[in-house]
Image: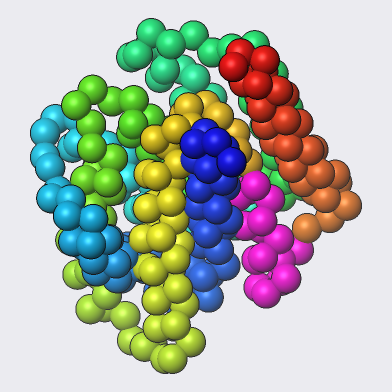
Amino acid sequence: MSARQRGTLCVFLAAVLYSIGGLCIKLIPWGGMAVNGGRTAIALVVIGAYLKLTHHKPRMNLWVLVGALAVCGTNILFSIANKLTTAANTIVLQFTAPIFVILFSVLFFGKKPQKLDVLACGLVLGGVLLFFVDGLSAGGMLGNILALLSGVSYAGVFLLNDMPDSDPISSVFWGDVISAAAGLPFVGYETDFSPNTLTALLVLGVFQVALAYILMVEGLKTTPPVTASLVSGIEPVLNPILVAVFYHEMIGPVALVGAMIVVGGVVLYNVILARQTEITI
């Protein structure tokens, strides 16, 4: 397996871990800020241990801060949106991220997207919209707006490695510090600390935030941001399926067709990309 293929696999695994977020957030009877404060505080312990094991001291500069704000914005907006609208709405609107990745790459880094990137982006987004066509209007408007804004900040996460003088893992660390500091005071207003609630919070912190971000950072070292954002197309499919199975926010046959388009589009994109890479080599 080449370095790029390993990187793509890391991004894919990160997306799978991200996909459990909708279900776990729905299962925790707290407000969005409290959930995010608790999960990022737990994540800080794991990420702190990772930094210590890798002997990586967190850095801080302007671009690390920009990256941290992207991580923090994604964390907070996703958590709150999940409480104000359906999990399906939240993830489909957040998955506008590939569009913003392409836009930001052109505006700030002067990188023009390849035709394959644009075509794959259109195919995947079309599948996502089809997947949620029956439920997009059902959620609260504020939740939908916040979910869309999370797509903007999520694009910044995919661009962490492209920022000048960047240090992606430091951005993740400081982003979680800001998230925890902003959210932990809200935990004091919650009353339900049952084993189920705490277990769901622990799963969010360890796997859906900490381990997922570590895998994403590793994957982005060798995976271009547009490719990474498209490979993550598995997340908006798995997220509402898990919620449908365990939380009973149901999906219909049209949604399943959309799911197949997303998965097929991502697989086809990577097959073509791999062949192009082999030809170049």
Residue at the far right: name it.
253
Q: Is residue 105 above or below residue 228?
A: above
Identify which residue, 250 or 245, lies in the foreground: 245
Q: Position of residue 4 (x, y in %)?
A: 52, 33
Is residue 133 visible in the rendered image? The answer is: no
Quadrant of the image containing the C terminus: top right
Residue 124 on the magenta segment: no
* Quarter holding residue 248: bottom right
Residue 246 on the magenta segment: yes
Quadrant of the image containing the N terminus: top right
Q: Which residue occupies 62% across, 57% down?
A: 239
Tally the numbered discs.
0
Q: Which residue occupies 69% across, 36% down?
A: 266
Q: Position of residue 192 (x, y in %)?
A: 38, 87
Identify the magenta region: 234-250
Identify which residue, 6 or 117, lies in the foreground: 6
Q: How is the image coloured?
A: rainbow
Q: Position of residue 46 (x, y in %)?
A: 29, 67
Identify which residue, 277 or 67, lies in the foreground: 277
User: Position of 253 compared to 92: left or right?
Assistant: right
Q: Position of residue 270 (x, y in %)?
A: 67, 31
Q: Which residue occupies 39% across, 69% down?
A: 206
Is residue 219 visible in the rendered image? The answer is: yes
Q: Is residue 261 above or below residue 184?
A: above
User: Position of 138 compared to 21: left or right?
Assistant: right
Q: Which residue occupies 45% across, 41% down?
A: 219
Q: Is residue 90 above or below residue 246?
A: above
Q: Is residue 197 above or below residue 62?
A: below
Identify which residue, 31 or 142, lies in the foreground: 31
Is most of the magenta stretch helix, strand or loop? helix
